[in-house]
C-alpha cells in the first residue's frame, strides 16, 4: 500500500546548527503538507507545496518538493529553542484522507 | 477566533464505560476528522466526515463511532472503551480537504482507560 517514510526519527542539534527532515512517498503526490507539533501541543499547519520542484521559504525554514513529486524536505537554518517539536509531512491518500509521515523530532542539546 | 474545540481535554475512565469526546469548529468547515496519536505510530485517522450526515472509516475505526448531525460538531463515541484505546485524540477540520488541504487541529484529548 501507499507509504510515506520520514527520516530521521529524531535529530539532536546544538542551538544554531541546521536541521533537515526528509519525506519519501511510494507514490506520486499531488501536493505535500508540513505540520509542526510543539511538545504537549497539537499539529499546526506550516505550508503546502503543489508544484514539481517547488521551493518555499518561511524565514529560516526552507521547504522543497521534489521534481518527481515523491519526496520533500524541510530545512531549518540556525535552529532556535522555539523550533523544538516534531515535524510531520502529509500527502493525499484520497480526496478525503491524508497519509502521514511518522514525524521527525527536533531536540536541542543543552 | 477561528478554532477547533475538544472536550474533555483529559479523561480517566474504566473499561466498558461509554464516553463521548466532543469536537466543535467555528469556521464553517465541511470536512472534519478524528485522529489518534500514539508514541512511535504517528497520527492515525479514525473516522472522517465530508459533510453533514456523511461519514466514513479511516485507518483505525474499530471500537469507535461518530456522527455528524450538524456542520460544526463531530463527536467521537467510545461505546465500550478498552485499555488499547488509551491515547491522545485530535479532532481536525478543513474547509474542503481535497481542494484546500490545510487541517486545523483541536488541542487534543488525552484519554486513559483503566
Image (cartoon, rainbow, N blue to C red):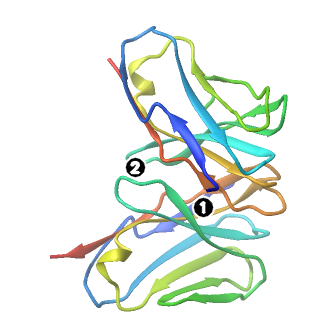
Q: Which mark is residue B3?
A: none
Looking at the image, can residue B42 be seen?
yes
Q: Residue at x 19, y 76 (%)?
A: A109
Mark 2, Cα crowd under 10 Å, few <14 / some 14-19 / many 20+, is: few
Question: How many numbered marks have been drawn onto this rendered protein structure?
Answer: 2
- Identify the element where label 1 is drawn: strand
Disc 1 sits on a residue from what chain?
A
Side of B29 where A64 appears, left or right: left
Looking at the image, can residue A1 be seen?
no
Q: Position of residue B23 (x, y in %)?
A: 61, 35
Q: Position of residue B35 (x, y in %)?
A: 57, 41
Q: Position of residue A30 (x, y in %)?
A: 79, 69
Q: Quadrant of the N terminus of chain B?
A: bottom right
Q: Residue at x 36, y 12 (%)?
A: B14
The answer to whether B37 is drawn above or below residue A61 in the figure is: above
Name the foreground residue: B8 vs B31.
B8
Q: Residue at x 45, y 8 (%)?
A: B16
- Identify the element where label 2 is drawn: loop
Quarter residue A37 falls in: bottom left
Which residue lies under the disc numbered 2?
A: B40
Q: Residue at x 73, y 77 (%)?
A: A69
Q: Are marks 1 and 2 in contact (CB under 8 Å)?
A: no
The answer to whether B75 is drawn above or below residue B91 in the figure is: above
Q: Position of residue A22 (x, y in %)?
A: 51, 75
Which residue lies under the disc numbered 1?
A: A4
Disc 2 sits on a residue from what chain?
B
The answer to whether A69 is drawn above or below residue B36 in the figure is: below
* Residue placed furthest toward the top: B16
Name the foreground residue: A64 vs B74.
B74
Q: Quadrant of the C terminus of chain B?
A: top left
The answer to whether B103 is drawn above or below residue B77 in the figure is: below
Mark 1, Cα crowd under 10 Å, few <14 / some 14-19 / many 20+, is: some
Amino acid at each position: 500500500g501507499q507509504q510515506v517514510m520520514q527520516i530521521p526519527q529524531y535529530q539532536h542539534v546544538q542551538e544554531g546548527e541546521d536541521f533537515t527532515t526528509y519525506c519519501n512517498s511510494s507514490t506520486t503526490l499531488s501536493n505535500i503538507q508540513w505540520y509542526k507539533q510543539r511538545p504537549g501541543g497539537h499539529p499546526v499547519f506550516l505550508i503546502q507545496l503543489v508544484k514539481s520542484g517547488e521551493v518555499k521559504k518561511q524565514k529560516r525554514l526552507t521547504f522543497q518538493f521534489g521534481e518527481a513529486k515523491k519526496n520533500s524536505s524541510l530545512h531549518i537554518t540556525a535552529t532556535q529553542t522555539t523550533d523544538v517539536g516534531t515535524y510531520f509531512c502529509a500527502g493525499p491518500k484520497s480526496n478525503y484522507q491524508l497519509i502521514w509521515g511518522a514525524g521527525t523530532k527536533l531536540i536541542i542539546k543543552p | 477566533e477561528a478554532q477547533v474545540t475538544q472536550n474533555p481535554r483529559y479523561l480517566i475512565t474504566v473499561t466498558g464505560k461509554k464516553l463521548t469526546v466532543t469536537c466543535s469548529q467555528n469556521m464553517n468547515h465541511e470536512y472534519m476528522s478524528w485522529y489518534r496519536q500514539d508514541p512511535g505510530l504517528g497520527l492515525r485517522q479514525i473516522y472522517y466526515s465530508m459533510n453533514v450526515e456523511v461519514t466514513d472509516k479511516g485507518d483505525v475505526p474499530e471500537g469507535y463511532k461518530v456522527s455528524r448531525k450538524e456542520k460544526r460538531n463531530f463527536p467521537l463515541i467510545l461505546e465500550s472503551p478498552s485499555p488499547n484505546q488509551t491515547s491522545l485524540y485530535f479532532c481536525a477540520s478543513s474547509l474542503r480537504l481535497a481542494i484546500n488541504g490545510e487541517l486545523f487541529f483541536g488541542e487534543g484529548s488525552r484519554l486513559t482507560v483503566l
